Image (cartoon, helix red, strand yellow):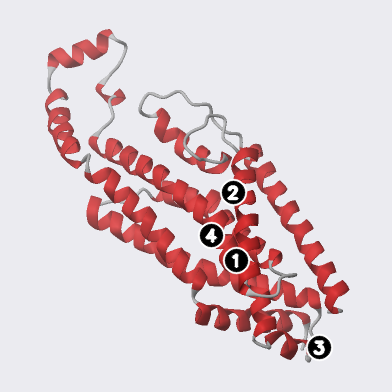
């Protein structure tokens, strides 16, 4: 079996084991439901105000005195947010509030839940079976990482589709630009980082108790380190540079004057994350070779 085949074999095995354990999938579903509920709860309280605003906006567009007043201020009716723009703003703010829970659960709870991946192989005899095959420690570790990340991303993708469907059903539209930017710039990297970190931290651990305690502690450190190291230019809730860059235009559209973020800052952010994960991966690989000759 060639190297890619070995890698796929380990990843496929982890996919099956992961679905049986079910912990990451249930957690991702909970995270998705929290985000959906958070947005719905935030916007539901403003729907009556939005209906009143829509009626008032339609009237003011035809009001000569109001238009003249705007002109005296150097403005036009086009400078006033339309009802759809106001709804998009409220949805974005609701998502921004709910995103705090996503960051917290990803970096702390997801890290802890995936830290049992390698100890589970030892506990249930899977590690011994794999070592009887011509698979090296580095392929084993890479395959486990790939399998866990896919196990996390599958339910995450399903919850993303559910969020889009719920928005269409409740509001009649979905801000795909907001959804895809937030997913690609922050959601996906957070899930991949937390999943990989949990797997790598669990390499030297022997049982579920150790994995839960150490994984939670490392997750808490990563949460605090992530927010303190990658905090946006302005402290808007618990937003890192990437998510701040997504929400900042919506906040500024309603009168705030928050500074923007350069693309280079986000690139540097994820370069640092990649280097951290690479370093931890190499340490985990050395531990396997040193302690288990694998």
The Cα–Cα distance between marks 2 and 4, rounded to whole angstroms, is 10 Å
The Cα–Cα distance between marks 2 and 1, rounded to whole angstroms, is 16 Å
Residue 177 picture location, percent across and down: 43, 47
Residue receiving disc 1: 212
101 and 59: which is toward the camera = 101
Residue 74 picture location, percent across and down: 32, 11
The Cα–Cα distance between marks 3 and 2, rounded to whole angstroms, is 38 Å
Q: Give the structural element (helix, strand or loop) at label 2.
A: helix
Instruction: Mark 3 vs mark 4: give the one in front.
Output: 4
The Cα–Cα distance between marks 3 and 4, rounded to whole angstroms, is 34 Å
125 and 238: which is toward the camera = 125
Q: Residue at x 40, y 60 (%)?
A: 32
The Cα–Cα distance between marks 1 and 4, rounded to whole angstroms, is 9 Å
Among numbered discs 3 and 2, the one appearing first in the sequence: 3
Instruction: Mark 2 vs mark 1: give the one in front.
Output: 1
Neighbours of disc 2 within 10 Å: few (<14), some (14-19), many (20+): some
Among numbered discs 2 and 1, the one appearing first in the sequence: 1
Residue 143 picture location, percent across and down: 69, 75
Neighbours of disc 3 within 10 Å: few (<14), some (14-19), many (20+): few
Residue 47 picture location, percent across and down: 19, 42
Q: Residue at x 64, y 49 (%)?
A: 221
Is residue 101 visible in this depiction of the protein? Answer: yes
Q: Is residue 291 above or below residue 93?
A: below
Among numbered discs 1 and 3, the one appearing first in the sequence: 3
Residue receiving disc 4: 109
Among numbered discs 2 and 4, the one appearing first in the sequence: 4
Q: Residue at x 37, y 23 (%)?
A: 255
Residue receiving disc 3: 134
Residue receiving disc 2: 223
């Amino acid at each position: 079996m060639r190297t890619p085949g070995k890698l796929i074999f380990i990843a496929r095995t982890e996919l099956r084991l992961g679905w049986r354990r079910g912990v990451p999938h249930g957690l991702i579903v909970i995270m998705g439901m929290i985000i959906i509920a958070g947005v719905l709860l935030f916007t539901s309280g403003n729907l009556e105000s939005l209906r009143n605003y829509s009626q008032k906006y339609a009237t003011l567009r035809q009001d000569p005195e109001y238009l003249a007043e705007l002109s005296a201020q150097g403005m036009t009716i086009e400078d006033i947010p339309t009802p759809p723009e106001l709804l998009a703003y409220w949805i974005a703010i609701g998502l921004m509030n709910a995103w705090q829970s996503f960051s917290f659960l990803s970096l702390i709870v997801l890290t802890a839940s995936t830290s049992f991946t390698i100890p589970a192989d030892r506990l249930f005899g899977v590690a011994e079976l794999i070592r009887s095959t011509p698979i090296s420690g580095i392929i084993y570790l890479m395959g486990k990482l790939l399998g866990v990340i896919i196990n996390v991303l599958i339910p995450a993708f399903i919850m993303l589709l559910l969020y889009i469907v719920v928005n269409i059903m409740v509001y009649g539209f979905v801000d795909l630009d907001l959804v895809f930017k937030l997913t690609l710039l922050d959601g996906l990297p957070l899930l991949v980082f937390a999943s990989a970190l949990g797997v790598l931290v669990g390499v030297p651990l022997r049982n579920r108790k150790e994995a839960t305690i150490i994984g939670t502690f490392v997750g808490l450190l990563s949460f605090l380190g992530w927010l303190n190291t990658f905090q946006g230019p302005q402290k808007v809730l618990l937003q890192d540079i990437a998510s701040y860059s997504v929400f900042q235009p919506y906040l500024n559209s309603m009168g705030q004057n928050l500074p923007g973020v350069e693309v280079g800052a986000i690139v540097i952010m994820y370069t640092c994350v990649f280097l951290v994960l690479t370093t931890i991966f190499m340490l985990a690989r050395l531990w396997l070779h040193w302690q288990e000759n694998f």
